Image (spheres, rainbow, N blue to C red):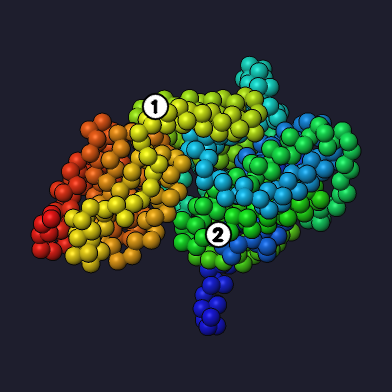
């Protein structure tokens, strides 16, 4: 690589890391406070994890640190040991060790088989937990570690509202939700709200709880005390934290693959996160994961390599050193408002538009996972959701035994289809989805569209009589976006009347174009031939 190219790459990584820090800093503060470990633990968690994950991880600008799901689990850990940091450390160390062990297995490659309703229900549950727990500090009350305790405390809370805290929190939410994009293009709304509302609270002398215990001193090193009681009692909690952190990191990796067009090594990604979290645990810092929002922001700003993750760690250290005084003045209610907005962003609201058309089986899974996540146990919710989805899928397959497994079968093309592709010099490609287009086959189908070179028109023939489930609908949206990015036009052929009407009733029809939806493959082929100005190909 030439020197100029290296400088260009470094420049992109530098600016990407700066933007990532601007987003990560207020979030790390908020998550640290929400976890019960403190704001300092949140900041150092972001610094340490991003540094080690950057050095050991994939060569992608994946920015790591505390996130909503890990903050919730960390809060449960802290509450379960009554805030005793010496008991928190071994639990966090066990979680990191479990994560490292997971990276040595095939589990990281299996995340793609988790059905969409399970992921949707879980993420929405996490978002609701954050909102429920942060409503109390937003109104000037104490922070709870349990959603049930928080809800039971609401009557008392609403009778004893701190008006000053509510005012600061309400204005913060207004800034977060309604700041124009022309402004957030240059400064994220979270940082803007943090600066403005901290200044308002300071200069007006508002009587509200503030962040405390943030210093630049290096975090203490702890030696974990693995007592028999800690190991036997808290292994399930450590496994929960490891699994949640692994799942979120892998989901971030999948998104980064889509953005950068570079395939990440899932095992290496999880391993680097595990090592980073081990150092976080040994220093009493916040456990974390690869963070989607920060990583995407870094890529959009020009970051291309893992140097961006290392730079973000160094820049955050400098920020912590220079602005300790300001950080200590940040009102807790402002951080609560930022967390509520983050919780809202985690909610999978896009699923609402397909609820009416989704199979009831998907809704059962989604609602079950959502309820268990919010009111019972996160890992139990995920496990139950996966098992329930598998059982319902088995029932669906049993009810449609004549349907074959989803595969692309170019060898089985008709002579006419082969002739169309050959005579068009493969500008026109015809693909068949045989059997049900469902969550288990999405990865194979979607990845197939990355392999189509020199293609201008794709005729996608879905001949099954099974309606598309939620996973299939969103996968189809992904296919359309990918093809549009490659300037490939999609013609969708749906022979089954019931499925055809389902597609017509979805918003996805506006992406495809009503004129590009067919029930007869020959008409779609002739339309493609007309648009490519080829001579009419006669079916032999």
Disc 1: which residue: 399
- Residue ID at (69%, 40%): 241
- Residue ID at (22%, 33%): 497
- Residue ID at (64%, 61%): 57
The answer to whether residue 59 is left or right of residue 45 is left
Residue 268 appears at what percent x and percent y? 64, 58
Q: Which mark is residue 264?
A: 2
SS label for mark 2: loop
**Dot 1 crowding, Cα within 10 Å, few <14, some 14–19, many 20+:** few
Residue 87 appears at what percent x and percent y? 84, 38
Q: Looking at the picture, does residue 257 appear above or below residue 75?
A: below
Instruction: Kindly tell me whether residue 230 is visible in this rendering.
Output: yes
Instruction: Kindly tell me whether residue 319 is visible in this rendering.
Output: no
* Nearer mark to the viewer, of 2 and 1: 1
The quadrant of the image that shows the C terminus is: bottom left
The answer to whether residue 498 is left or right of residue 129 is left
Q: Looking at the picture, does residue 217 appear above or below residue 517?
A: below
State the residue in front, 351 or 413.
413
Residue 423 appears at what percent x and percent y? 18, 65
Q: Residue furthest bottom?
A: 2
């Amino acid at each position: 690589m030439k020197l100029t190219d290296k400088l260009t790459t470094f420049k992109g990584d530098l600016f990407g890391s700066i933007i990532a820090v601007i987003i990560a800093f207020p979030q790390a503060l908020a998550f640290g406070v929400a976890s019960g470990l403190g704001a300092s633990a949140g900041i150092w968690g972001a610094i340490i994890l991003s540094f080690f994950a950057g050095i050991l991880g994939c060569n992608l600008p994946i920015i790591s640190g505390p996130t909503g799901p890990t903050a919730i689990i960390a809060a449960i850990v802290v509450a379960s040991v009554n805030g005793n940091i010496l008991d928190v450390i071994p639990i966090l160390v066990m979680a990191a060790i479990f994560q490292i062990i997971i990276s040595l297995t095939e589990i990281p490659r299996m995340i793609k088989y988790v059905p969409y309703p399970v992921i949707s229900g879980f993420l929405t549950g996490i978002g609701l937990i954050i909102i429920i727990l942060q409503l109390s500090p937003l109104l000037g009350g104490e922070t709870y570690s349990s959603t049930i305790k928080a809800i039971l405390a609401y009557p008392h809370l609403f009778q004893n509202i701190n008006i000053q805290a509510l005012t600061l929190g309400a204005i913060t939410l207004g800034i977060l939700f309604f700041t124009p994009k022309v402004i957030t293009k240059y400064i994220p709304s979270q940082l803007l709200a943090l600066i403005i509302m901290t200044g308002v609270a300071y200069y007006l002398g508002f009587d509200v709880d503030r962040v405390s215990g943030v210093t630049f001193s290096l975090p203490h090193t702890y030696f974990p005390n693995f007592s028999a009681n800690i190991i036997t009692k808290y292994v399930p909690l450590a496994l929960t934290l490891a699994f949640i952190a692994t799942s979120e990191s892998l989901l971030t990796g999948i998104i980064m693959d889509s953005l950068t067009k570079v395939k990440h090594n899932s095992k290496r990604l999880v391993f680097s996160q595990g090592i980073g979290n081990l150092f976080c645990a040994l220093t009493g810092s916040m456990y974390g994961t690869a963070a989607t929002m920060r990583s995407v922001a870094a890529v959009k700003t020009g970051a291309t390599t893992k140097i961006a993750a290392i730079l973000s760690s160094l820049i955050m250290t400098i920020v912590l050193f220079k602005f300790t005084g300001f950080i200590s003045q940040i009102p807790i209610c402002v951080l609560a408002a930022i967390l509520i907005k983050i919780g809202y962003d985690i909610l999978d609201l896009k699923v609402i538009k397909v609820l009416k058309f989704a199979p009831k089986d998907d809704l059962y899974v989604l609602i079950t996972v959502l309820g268990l996540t919010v009111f019972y146990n996160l890992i139990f919710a995920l496990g139950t959701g996966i098992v329930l989805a598998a059982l319902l899928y088995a029932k669906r397959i049993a009810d449609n035994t004549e349907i074959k497994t989803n595969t692309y079968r170019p060898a089985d093309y008709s002579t006419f289809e082969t002739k169309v592709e050959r005579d068009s010099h493969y500008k026109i490609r015809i693909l068949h989805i045989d059997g049900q287009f469902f969550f288990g086959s999405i990865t194979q189908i979607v990845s197939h569209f990355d392999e189509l070179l020199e293609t201008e028109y794709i005729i996608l023939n879905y001949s099954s009589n099974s309606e598309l489930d939620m996973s299939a609908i969103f996968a189809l949206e992904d296919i359309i976006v990918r093809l549009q990015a490659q300037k490939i036009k999609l013609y969708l052929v749906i022979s089954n009347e019931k499925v055809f009407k389902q597609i017509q009733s979805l918003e996805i029809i506006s992406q495809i174009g009503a004129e590009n939806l067919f029930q007869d493959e020959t008409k779609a082929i002739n339309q493609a031939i007309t648009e490519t100005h080829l001579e009419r190909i006669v079916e032999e």
